Image (spheres, rainbow, N blue to C red):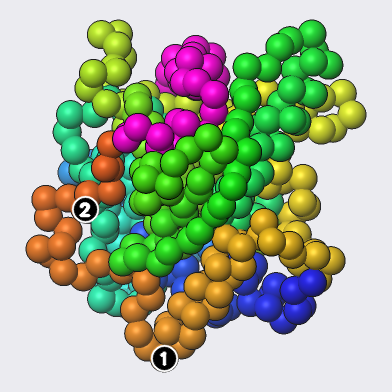
Amino acid sequence: MIAPEIGERLAHVGPGTPMGDLLRRYWHPIAAAPELDQDPVRPVRLLGEDLTLFRSETGALGLVGDRCAHRGISLAYGIPQENGLRCAYHGWTYNTQGQVVDMPFEPTCLPLRITAYPVQELGGLIFAYLGPAPAPLLPRWDALARDDRTRRIEFTPLPCNWLQCVENAMDPLHVEFLHGQYAVYFNKRRGKTSKFTPRRHLKIEFDPFRFGIFKRRLLEGQSEDTYEWQVGHPLLFPNILALPTEDHFLLGYRVPVDDTHTMNISYYAVRPEAAKPTDEPLALAYDPLTYDEIGRIEGTDVGRQDEMAFVAQGPITDRTRWHPATSDKGVNFLHRMLLENIERVERGEDPVGVVRDWEENEPMIQIDPGVHAGGWMATFAGTDYFRRWVEDDGMRRAKL
């Protein structure tokens, strides 16, 4: 079991909580840029805070509190102006710093300011920083910063705590069972044949590095010089799975909405040689969970099986009832690293992965080493099934 106080320290993300203070030292994606073309004002919830994202008539991005300081109406009904966001009720207008810049009918503007946070756009995503000043640099991961990739972004809201999603990324052995045996069972009951045949894991290891944790595995039939055992692929601390494949590079953001909700954002940067002539430069998909007739999540593909495992533990998993085993080595490593970095923040230090050096951040931070023989794709007997999953309805791609 895990002590109750440790579970509490790890799970809660609201203002003033230990984990909330740690997570506020990082930039988090809150929307895709094309969403603001559809509607330039959007309500946002992040780390337990209700906020309003907007784009002014001059193109400036703002993220401010959810309520007007005058009479408390939601700013999600606001009207973009050249100088900010105008409240729909009485016209008070807020700039991107949350400062009131116009009060119709009043002889002068009162010196009022509502909550406001920095926002930036990169690679088609809009990121927010909710921590103390000075804000660190928004990391220019190569998958985001490169201009030669076709991008697909998929949003799935999940009714569970963010950490359950990240723990899954530090648990290599689940591939054999969740994506292997369960997938076979699930498909058989629907008259289908599963072609997903994972190899057995022989060894797993986890190594800290500048931006997080590399996870390594050795599979049955592999030699120890395989790339997946020598290097592996990273979890970008604290909540981003970085996964290279033959066709694309995936950044899997597990964005903490609040204690019991997560936005799962899958960002696919498709390699130029794998892109189709019909692909749009940036495509969005909204992919809510689907349930069977008795309320179970439909584990129709690899991504959905993972999301099923996240949510099936409950809104916040009760870690006091766990019985951690040898296979949980990576999860234990993640917990220790999170607790250590909470302590770093409490001492006034930057946690792991925070970027403040412009030279380190430019032109981009390389995390895409390419796919080497014997790499992640070798977890499965062949790549044909996975490639079809990327190219067909398994991607669940949709247009706005």
**Along the viewing direction, whichever of 128 and 63 lies nearer the viewer:** 128
Nearer the viewer's eye, disc 1 or disc 2? 2
Residue at 48% across, 38% down: 222
What residue type is disc 2 on?
Answer: Ile
Judge whether 45 appears above or below 211 on screen: above
- For label 1, the residue is 347
What residue type is disc 1 on?
Answer: Arg
User: Residue 112 appears in which quarter of the rendering?
Assistant: bottom left
The picture places residue 85, in percent across and down from the top left corner, at 33, 51
Query: Is 373 in the magenta?
Result: yes
Q: Looking at the rendering, in which quadrant would you find the N terminus?
A: bottom right
Residue at 61% across, 63% down: 329
For the residues labelled 1 and 2, say whether their Cβ atoms are less than 8 Å apart: no
Query: Is 334 in the magenta?
Result: no
**Along the viewing direction, whichever of 201 and 359 lies nearer the viewer:** 201
The picture places residue 285, in percent across and down from the top left corner, at 48, 26
Q: Would residue 38 be seen by someone viewing this image from the given angle?
A: no
- For label 2, the residue is 365
The answer for how far apart the CA atoms under marks 1 and 2 are is 27 Å
Magenta stretch bounds: 371-400
Q: Secondary structure at mark 1?
A: loop
Q: Is residue 179 left or right of residue 255?
A: right
Judge whether 157 appears above or below 29 on screen: above
